[in-house]
Amino acid sequence: MSGHSHWATIRRKKGAQDAKRGQLFTRLAREIVIAAREGGGDPETNLRLQYAIERARAQNMPKDNIERAIKRGTGESKDGAALEEITYEGYAPNGIALMISCVTDNRNRAVSEIRHVLSRAGGSMAEAGSVAWQFKRIAYFSFPQGDHDPDAIFELAVEAGADDVTFEDGTVEITGPVETFKQISDALRQANIHPEEAELRMEPTNEVELSPENTMQVLKVIEALEDLDDVQDVYSNLSISAEVMAQIEEA
């Protein structure tokens, strides 16, 4: 499992990410709104909405909340301010590149809060395009291996267009080009595999490894950014060593 995914999994298990239930539901609802607005309110024909709903259900989000979010996305309901999806670029301490994905009803508030977190930690916002070239967008899937045969998983993923399949600590990660997202999703469903994570994400083309102390400093900045209400995801080119991972697991 990649360092970032492992770290994220540890945080979820410890309850550190989205510790406030209300904040979690707000974030999930925004994801549903954006998905419904882009691809319509039918999850059978809108894969992004389908997975947004599945993630919401996995967190025990009430059905009424899900339905309201879908109607808001399709325009059936005018409840709440209009949301927009924005990605900001920046640098954490030690020159670590960041891509910060937001869904917000107030662009000025979002950028102000992000700038405050970064500047307080010795980082900075970056001009559009100055960081993005260090990342590529990929299709990403993650799920427990369980009783699934690894050879069968590998075969179905590759046949569906995946670039890489990894097995580590009981977790399977599949990555591939953006255009293979639906094919891989369909292949997993046909095999009765339901991913815990299925999304398009940003992957660094080259990672930077820092000392354990500096790595922890950067991770704290990323965590502070992720705790902002408007922030959905934070991607970085930080390489997390096994030594640091062990420290995180023991904390």
Image (cartoon, rainbow, N blue to C red):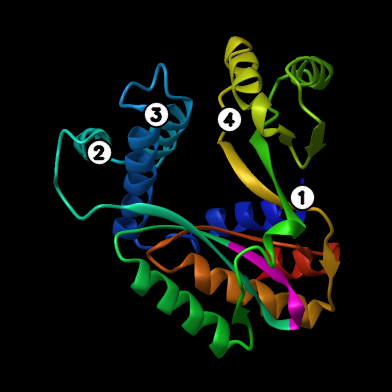
Q: Is residue 220 left or right of residue 160?
A: left
Q: Are marks 1 and 2 in contact (CB under 8 Å)?
A: no
Q: Is residue 220 left or right of residue 109?
A: right
Distance from Cα at disc 2 to Cα at disc 3: 22 Å
Label 3 crowding class (10 Å Cα cut-off): few <14, some 14-19, many 20+? some
Q: Which quadrant of the structure image shows residue 70? A: top left
The span shown in magenta is: 94-99
Distance from Cα at disc 4 to Cα at disc 1: 16 Å
Residue 24 placement (x, y as % from top left)? 37, 54
| Residue type marked 3 | Gly
Q: Are marks 4 and 3 in contact (CB under 8 Å)?
A: no
4 or 1: tag closer to the N-terminus: 1
4 or 2: tag closer to the N-terminus: 2
Residue shown at the point (80%, 20%) measured from the top left: 158
Instruction: Residue at the far top: name it.
Output: 190
The image's mark for residue 2 is: 1
1 or 2: tag closer to the N-terminus: 1
The image's mark for residue 39 is: 3
- Answer yes or no: is residue 5 visible: yes
1 or 3: tag closer to the N-terminus: 1
Residue 241 placement (x, y as % from top left)? 84, 64
